[in-house]
């Protein structure tokens, strides 16, 4: 069981070029890689908070190096039978969908199409190298969790039931009953399915963008390798999480409250699972939300990668601090001006319900 937590700071958008940048990538010391995110204390700008990660990707990082460093190394393990899970976590507008799905141009492709492309390539090579002795089948499932209900995105929206798909335990694993699965031959096949499914997601909802930022979208790639009567099965899951911002700050409608309660709960459980896995705990609280339960997070020898997406500008300041608190593996506070008193003060709590999740963490020094 292993977990990596990395941060990716997105570049400024066209309309943000004159905005104040408050989030920076840094290193622990000269000559080391970027592993620290720095952000001022909104209550005292002379003070700076630092958050430590396994790696930090600064504004200019293209899609390819992120994939090559964080995901590509695990594809071998996937073919050895290890489950791989990749999350994009962060406030709406910070680059989760860009990171996972990306754009249509080759260089803009995100983690998901690159993962699929590598899986197909490796599968084909394996079949060739074994002269067909081993066959490799790649099957996709794609679903979303909205208000703690599971909806199949490979099915047209009119076939959705209000209660969503039920879960059931089988051989110690959680299965989504009735979730469809489609076999895929190549990247073209995948892209056709994926585009169609993303259209299902949008047409199933009346409030397009609002909806996608309030549900978790989970793509599951099942790799089945068959050699004679031996079958090896493993899955790679790529998850574009619901926005971690405090929805209640902008809208107090009843529907929003139900949504944010569901989002907060599942993101909180997720961060607790990540913490527990990285500490090497025996007990992972994965059963406490549907998302972590379906993924059986931490229940096998799996590899988990969490990518925290960050927008560098001031208008995201409080939400950025809140998501750094949840996902950073260690935190310290630095004082820029020598005459300032060193105070180990926590960033302000937001109403998101998990803004204080980092409170018990140890400062690095
Ligand atoms: P989220 O899914 O977290 O709400 P998006 O992925 O939709 O955020 O990103 C918000 C905007 O920022 C989009 O216009 C997207 O194209 C742009 N963007 C995000 N990350 C990057 C990046 N690394 N490079 C260039 N543009 C980016
Ligand atoms: Mg998105």
Image (cartoon, rainbow, N blue to C red):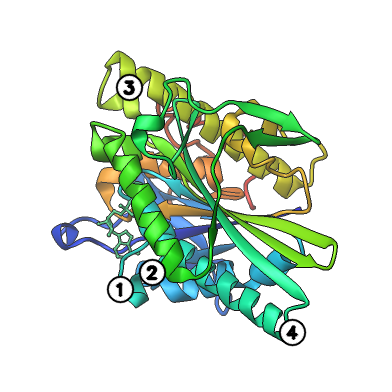
Instruction: Give the Cα separation between the discs numbered 1 and 4.
Output: 34 Å
Percent x, y of residue 330: 61, 49
Q: Distance between the residues labelled 2 and 4?
A: 32 Å
Q: How far apart are marks 3 and 1 (CA)?
A: 35 Å
Name the residue tied to disc 1: 105
Circle 4 is placed at which residue position? 131
**Do we see residue 24 in this rendering?**
no
Earlier in the chain: of badge 1 and badge 4, it is 1
Mark 2 vs mark 1, CA separation in Å: 6 Å
> Front-most of 74 and 181?
181
Which residue is rendered at x = 46% and y = 70% of the image? 187
Provide the residue designation for mark 2.
109
Which quadrant of the frame does ligand 1 lie within?
Answer: bottom left
Q: Nearer the observer, disc 4 or disc 3?
A: 4
Residue identifier under label 3: 256
- Kindly indicate whether the residue at mark 1 contacts the one at mark 3 (C-beta within 8 angstroms): no
Q: In the image, is the residue at mark 1 within 8 Å of ligand 1 by its beta carbon?
A: no
Q: Are marks 2 and 1 in contact (CB under 8 Å)?
A: yes
Q: Is mark 4 on a helix, strand or loop?
A: loop
Label 4, label 3: how far apart the Cα atoms are = 55 Å
Q: Nearer the viewer, mark 2 or mark 4?
A: 4
**Of the two numbered discs 3 and 1 in the rendering, the one whose residue sits closer to the viewer:** 1
Please indicate, yes or no, whether residue 96 appears anywhere in the rendered image: yes
Q: Position of residue 102 (x, y in %)?
A: 36, 63
Asked which quadrant contains residue 183, the reply is bottom right
In the image, 294 versus 158, the foreground residue is 158
Image location (x, y in percent) of residue 343: 51, 40
SS assignment at label 1: loop
């Amino acid at each position: 069981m292993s977990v990596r937590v990395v941060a990716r700071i997105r570049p400024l958008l066209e309309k943000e070029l004159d905005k104040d940048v408050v989030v920076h990538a840094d290193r622990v010391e000269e000559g080391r890689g970027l592993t620290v995110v720095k952000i001022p204390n909104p209550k005292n700008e002379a003070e700076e908070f630092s958050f430590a990660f396994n790696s930090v990707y600064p504004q200019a990082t293209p899609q390819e190096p992120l994939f090559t460093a964080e995901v590509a190394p695990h594809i071998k393990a996937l073919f050895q039978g290890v489950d791989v899970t990749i999350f994009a976590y962060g406030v709406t507008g910070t680059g989760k969908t860009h990171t996972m799905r990306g754009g249509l141009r080759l260089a803009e492709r995100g983690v998901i199409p690159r993962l699929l492309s590598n899986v197909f390539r490796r599968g084909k090579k394996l079949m060739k190298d074994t002269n067909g002795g081993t066959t490799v089948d790649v099957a996709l499932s794609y679903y979303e969790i909205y208000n703690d209900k599971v909806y199949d995105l490979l099915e047209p929206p009119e076939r959705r039931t209000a209660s969503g798909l039920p879960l059931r335990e089988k051989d110690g694993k959680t299965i989504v009953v009735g979730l469809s699965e489609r076999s895929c031959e190549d990247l073209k096949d995948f892209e056709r399915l994926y585009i169609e499914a993303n259209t299902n997601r949008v047409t199933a909802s009346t409030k397009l963008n609002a909806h996608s930022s309030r549900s978790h979208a989970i793509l599951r790639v099942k790799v089945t390798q068959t050699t004679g009567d031996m079958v090896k099965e493993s899955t790679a899951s790529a998850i574009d999480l619901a926005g971690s911002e405090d929805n209640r700050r902008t809208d107090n409608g009843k529907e929003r409250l139900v949504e944010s309660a569901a989002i907060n709960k599942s993101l909180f459980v997720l961060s607790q699972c990540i913490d527990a896995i990285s500490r090497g705990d025996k007990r992972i609280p994965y059963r406490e939300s549907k998302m972590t339960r379906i993924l059986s997070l931490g229940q096998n020898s799996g590899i988990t990668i969490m990518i925290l997406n960050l927008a560098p500008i001031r208008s995201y300041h409080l939400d950025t601090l809140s998501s750094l608190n949840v996902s950073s593996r260690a935190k310290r506070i630095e004082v820029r001006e020598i005459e300032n008193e060193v105070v180990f003060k926590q960033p302000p709590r937001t109403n998101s319900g998990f803004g204080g999740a980092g409170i018990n963490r140890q400062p690095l020094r």
